[in-house]
Amino acid sequence: MSPSPPLAARVQAWAVRLLLIVIALVVAGQLARVFPPLSFQVPMLWPLSGVALAVLLHWGAGCVPALWIGSAIAAFAVGAPPGLAVALGAGSTAGAWMAAHWLGRAVFDRRLPQRRDLLLLLGIGILGGTMLSATNAAAWLAAFGRIAPSDLPATWLARWASESLGLLVLGVPLITTDTQSWRRAFNPERWPGTTSLMLASVAAAAFAFLLNTSAGIGALVPLLLLPVLVCWLALRSGAAVASACVAVLATGLLVATAFGLGPFAAATGGRGTGLLFAFLLSLTALVLMPHVLIGELGRLEARWQLALDGSDIGVADWNMRTGEGYTSPRWRALLSDPDGVTTDSIARLLAHVHPEDRPPLLSALAAIDSPPGAGLRHEARLQVPEGWYWFDLHVIVTERDAAGAPLRIIASIADIGARRSAQERQTLSSNLFLHLHEGLLITDAEMRVLDANPTYSRITGVPREELIGTVPSLLRAGSSNDQGGRMQQAAMWADLRTSGHWVGEVVDRRRNGDPCALQVTVSTVNGPDATLRYHVMVVSDITEQRLQRERLERQALYDELTRLPNRAHLSQLMTEAMRSAEADGHVLAVCCLDIDHFKAVNDRHGSEAGDRLLAELAIRLRSALRSRGAARADVAARLGGDEFVLLLHAGSVDETRHAIDRVLGVVGQPFAVAPNDELVRITASVGATLFPMDGSDADTLLRHADHAMYDVKQAGRNGFEFFDPEHRRRAEERVVAIGRVQEALDEGELVLYYQPKVDLRRGVVLGVEALLRWNHPDHGVVSPVHFLPLIEHTGLSARIGDHVLARALDQLDAWQAQGLDLSVSVNITARHLQEADFVQRLAELLGRHSRHLGPRLELEVLETAALTDIGFTSSLLERCARLGVRWALDDFGTGYSTLTYLKRLPVQVLKIDRSFVKNMLTDAQDRAIVEGVVSLARTFDCTAVAEGVETPAQARMLLDMGCEIGQGEGIAAPMPAAQVAEWVANWRGLFALAPALVFPPPAAAAGGHPGAGD
């Protein structure tokens, strides 16, 4: 928005405008003096009233002072005394102001586009403003004695006529003029015609007035062309230009007549003045009337066009005689034809009509017997650049020739694509409503049925006619008799109020009383004002699906034979029972029941009889169970085969025992498995665990009960036993530990350490004993005492024994290759020794090596293991001896062997247990045992080897007793294989031998160190 000019500039512009107004009025007054008079002191055209009204309409009431001054000066200039001039100026200005005021209030349009505006100008301007000015002028002229009182009416009439003509001739062009009108009249396309008409008008007037005055009335003949030219100019260029031309012509005619020129001056008897007055009025009328008529027609056309556009209707008019055509803007917009070229004829229009829709239009155009104005209204598809679109096409033949051919055709089109789509959707909706597989019900806000489709009637059995106006039972408040149904209805109404939507399954009855399961969806539909208008209910009959689902659920959750819950359902029942036990603080006994020797029943009586027994047993179990409410009801379930699970609720352990005894008593009753067959008696084994004392999960509880049941089986069957969680925990820990040992074997964590055996007398290394160690990744080197007892009675014991033999032989072969002449002793467990293929596997291990390693291999077996089965052990040892392998009895003296057993065993070495060697220096009994073992070895031609030699004194005593071979921490601790060769090379024997101690007689020793050998 541009800033307003400063105050000084505005005042200056206003002053200049007022000055121009005064000058214009003075000039107009002087010009009026030249015009021929109508009567005394009244010129034929007084222009001041028209100028004043135009100024007020253009610039407003702020020009009133200038108008008054200018009018007064103009009056004074034509001979009026000052007082009269002021009075005349005031009256003239007042009349113009009053007319401008009332025209403004009447919303007058100074462009005169309508008949109303012309009538307002004539009524208010001529009958109002000029009449007031004329009355004022006549009165003041009479008051100042310029006219006789008797001449007052004539003077008033002449004054009014003069000012009225001035308003029409000079005021109209000033009122209607604007820049836009002149630019439109003189634009590049129009200015030649406008200029030509104006020049022709001036030329016609000049030609008529330049004729010899003696021609008299004959000179009016050239003037006949002038009204035609003026009217043509008004039609072409508008009122502003044409009225300005009339003002120029009127001024020229008046001045010429005043100077005696022209046909009006030649008229005698005052007729010329009247003819000139009438001629000027006619010229003005020929400007205003066509202008107003054109404006009215334009307004009507615009209104008609707005009506057509507002109704989205396009119109076309084709003249078949001339080939001309008209299409409205909306027509061109609808058909995407901005230039109107593709549909400028009926033939081109028909070319754009779809071939299927064209015949009816051609028939309507060819129907010669149709009355005038009759036509065809047809929905047709017309091709536009975007494709085929539906239009409502109305074609009217308004004129036909004698042969019946159309002469004029009027057509209208309206875009009905949206309506057509809506109709198609409505048709589709109706078809869906009628043929939908789901029942559909529509109600009003009060749940009264408005419509229902046939499927709904078929589902419920109620005809549509009976449903209309009623409230369906599914939506009727309080229609359900059970608590669940009432809660479901309350939930439905709550959802409808909050979200406007509810979905659920409802059990209802058909009209014939049959129950049915329905999937119901209820939705609310609001109106434009957001208030509830309708409810829509969609109903699907899911009775068969519900029955099928229940059958599948029974099959999935219950055993077909016994009708007891199956394994899948048992998990849910156990979860609920455990939750109830925790909440109420009672005991839940989870029991596994297995029929004893059920296979024998099947083998003797057949599988069908076995099935009948299981079904009868299920009935008995259900009858033996207690029901103390849904939360504490006992449960019987079948896992499969002859295995059952019982969930028994009790207040104590004793109550649980009584309940299990009751069940076993029921099971022990005879069964009739066949009509003519003997009764069958069975027993059962039951294992139980108690929750929450056993705080495991459901699966673990079942597993614990199953473990307890198998303990009953192993104990002789026909009884029950409770699961011991602590015992099971220890067993599981043992299983985990054994598994870890297995992993250690697989991962190569089990390694061999070697402890040397030496000749104590000669200081020579004779061999080494392979000792197993676990190189644990977290705990370092672990002694075998911590893991071998775990696997002593498992198959893993033999695998580890094979592993030790294989590694020891590999190392023995490597030492032999290095020139290190050593023997290797390997401990053999009782389980390993008792393997049926022990000798075969030993032979295979020896056969892997090219060197004959048998004589260098010594196998050590515990005395207790060797004496378990003396015959088997003797035979096995002899077969191994054929491979060159030597045998040694380890820890000799700790067992209970007899001399007979020792005589039968083909062993070559007796190893004295370290417990005797350790205390023989201080304990006479241990010393005596060592001496005895050495003596037995000598008697049975065996070599005695002492274990646990820790000091030179012990070594000296052993030598004195005749035992020359020893091993122990005093000689060397067990070491990795990589350190053995270096140790052997550095071994020089015991560097100091303690003298042998002299001990008191046995009696004294016995009293001094009781239990020292421990």
Image (cartoon, grey):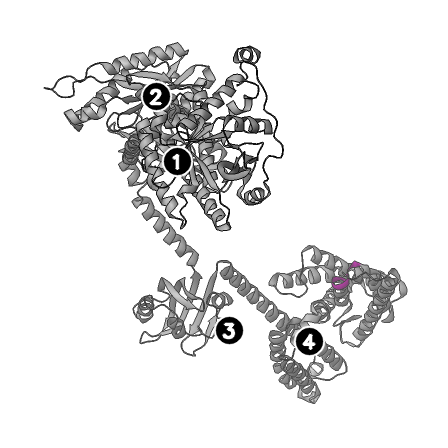
Up-down relation of residue 734 to residue 406 (above or below): above
Mark 2 or mark 1: which is in front? 1
Please state if 619 lies on the left or on the right of 212 as rendered: left
Mark 4 or mark 2: which is in front? 2
Q: CA distance from mark 1 to mark 3?
A: 106 Å
Q: Position of residue 409 (x, y in %)?
A: 40, 70
Amino acid carrying mark 4 in the image? Val
Q: CA distance from mark 3 to mark 4?
A: 39 Å
Up-down relation of residue 820 to residue 534 (above or below): below
Q: Which mark is residue 127?
A: none
- Quarter of the image for residue 593 reads top left
In the structure shown, which secondary structural element does the residue marked by tag 3 occupy?
A: loop
Q: Earlier in the sequence, mark 2 or mark 1?
A: 2
In the structure shown, which secondary structural element does the residue marked by tag 2 occupy?
A: helix
Numbered-mark total? 4
Where does the magenta region start and end? Answer: 56-61
Residue identifier under label 2: 711
Contact? badges 4 and 1 (CB < 8 Å): no
Amino acid carrying mark 1 in the image? Ala
Residue furthest to the left in view is 676
Residue 517 in magenta stretch: no
Residue visible at 55% across and 67% down in the picture: 297
Up-down relation of residue 494 to residue 439 (above or below): above
Q: Which mark is residue 246?
A: 4
Residue identifier under label 3: 339
